[in-house]
Amino acid sequence: MSDPLTSEPWSPAEFEARLRKIGEERYHSRHPFHRLLHEGKLTQGQVQAWVLNRYYYQSRIPMKDAALMSQVEDPEFRREWIRRIHDHDGTEGGIDRWLILAEGVGLDPDYVRSTEGVLPATRFAVDAYVRFVRDKSLLEAVASSLTELFAPDLHKARIAALLENYAFANDQTLAYFRKRLTQAPRDVAFGLAFVQREARTREKQEAALAALRFKTDVLWAQLDALYFAYVEPGLVPPGAFVPKTE
Amino acid sequence: MSDPLTSEPWSPAEFEARLRKIGEERYHSRHPFHRLLHEGKLTQGQVQAWVLNRYYYQSRIPMKDAALMSQVEDPEFRREWIRRIHDHDGTEGGIDRWLILAEGVGLDPDYVRSTEGVLPATRFAVDAYVRFVRDKSLLEAVASSLTELFAPDLHKARIAALLENYAFANDQTLAYFRKRLTQAPRDVAFGLAFVQREARTREKQEAALAALRFKTDVLWAQLDALYFAYVEPGLVPPGAFVPKTE
């Protein structure tokens, strides 16, 4: 491998292609758990486990975005980024919408909100993400958000797949995903432009790529844990959610 | 002193009285630099130094509030606190208003925005505040914001004093302080209720008092540095703003 300290930076096009390649190879759309979900092969209990655990991720996203903003000296940048917090926290925001989905799949929203029953591995992965954004450089923090480059395709496929395969799926329960179809591209355009602008050396470009890979690990690890606990071998750790037998 | 681990918590009224006593004894309204300012005894260059250095504090407040929000798990709480960021960052927000004041006292807003010329001691104190909020408990972070209990009285006195004593003072240049007269009481009511609710042991009450004392130190230290550099002995450190001789 060439030395990032002495190598020329990649062109913007080449750099973006490398960012996108990470999505092709490592985004959680490729995870077996998502395949089962989209093919309609999960039981209601397994879908509940997914919704419950993913709620923990959703609930930490505004904290992650606040941690990111605490690093930002430029008011213009903060004015742009703060929308993300409103998108999640606002009335009919992302967290509310996720709770509607939770109710739709038969979970008690108060139980979900309590985050009791969440898999420890979910907490570890998600908390690691919040800490990463808090402690790493702003460039790396923003780069880690670029999984949004890959999210709209996944969400589009998911909406169609869930509508086809599950009784709980309807416009109301899937509103979270539909809303993200417009929010994510707007957000990612800003994030990508920032990363292109700031990563002007090969070393910084490599750091941005590593940050995006880290984020794909955070997402992937959550599905590994779900698969292990609720699909195969199906060993639910002590204290975690146990689906009712169907 | 009694042991905070074994002592009974103070009643809400007694606890609030102790918080308010910190303001009486340690709030920067009592600092000699503020007295000179309010008595019209500062030269334009000294006022400029105050405005320039205080801009650094203003510019970090939204970062401090984002750091605080990154600790908050409750969306309701975040929805309340996020207003503070808008109050500072928004169009005609606190930072804009402070820059209008800066222009009014004859400073170039771009120079102010660059934060070049800010006293190192200002940076150390302000950065310590942001770090405190980021690293301490949420209770301590919120408690440190309670200097807002004391701010409206200071701002009222300041508006009257500046109008009386300085040619630059008018409705436009003093808009920052006037706006804070309504914002601060709204904010502090929420903060005080939170601190009262969360500090249910003597140990936590003591931690909240210590956090508020810390914040008064942060404000006081900024005025010490201004006094030292621009009043007496008047030794401006290398690289810091030097007023034009008048």
Image: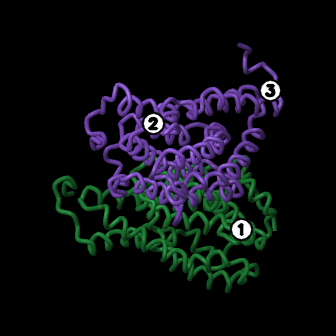
Chain colours: A green, B purple
- The reply to whether dot 1 and dot 2 touch (C-beta < 8 Å) is no
Residue B166 rendering spot, x and y as whole percentages: 47, 47
Q: In the figure, A15 relative to B174: above or below?
A: below
Circle 3: is it few (<14), some (14-19), or many (20+) Cα within 10 Å? some
Instruction: Work out how far the residue at label 1 is from the one at label 2, CA to CA, in angstroms.
Output: 55 Å
- Hey, which quadrant is residue B232 in on the image? top left
Left or right: A162 in relation to A126: right
Q: Secondary structure at mark 2?
A: loop
Q: In the figure, A4 relative to B154: above or below?
A: below
Can you identify the residue that label 3 sits on? B9
State which mark lies toward you, 1 or 2: 2
Q: Amino acid at mark 1?
A: Asp
Residue sitting at 45 percent across and 72 percent down? Answer: A188
Residue A96 rendering spot, x and y as whole percentages: 71, 68
State which mark lies toward you, 1 or 3: 3
Q: Amino acid at mark 3?
A: Pro
Q: Is residue B204 visible?
A: no
- Hey, which quadrant is residue A191 in on the image? bottom left
Q: Chain of mark 3?
A: B
Residue sitting at 73 percent across and 47 percent down? Answer: B189
Can you identify the residue that label 1 sits on? A96
Q: Secondary structure at mark 1?
A: helix
Q: Chain of mark 1?
A: A
Q: Is residue A237 visible?
A: yes
Residue A164 rendering spot, x and y as whole percentages: 67, 86
User: Which quadrant holds the N terminus of chain A?
Assistant: bottom left
- The reply to whether dot 2 and dot 3 touch (C-beta < 8 Å) is no
Circle 1: is it few (<14), some (14-19), or many (20+) Cα within 10 Å? some
Can you identify the residue that label 2 sits on? B41
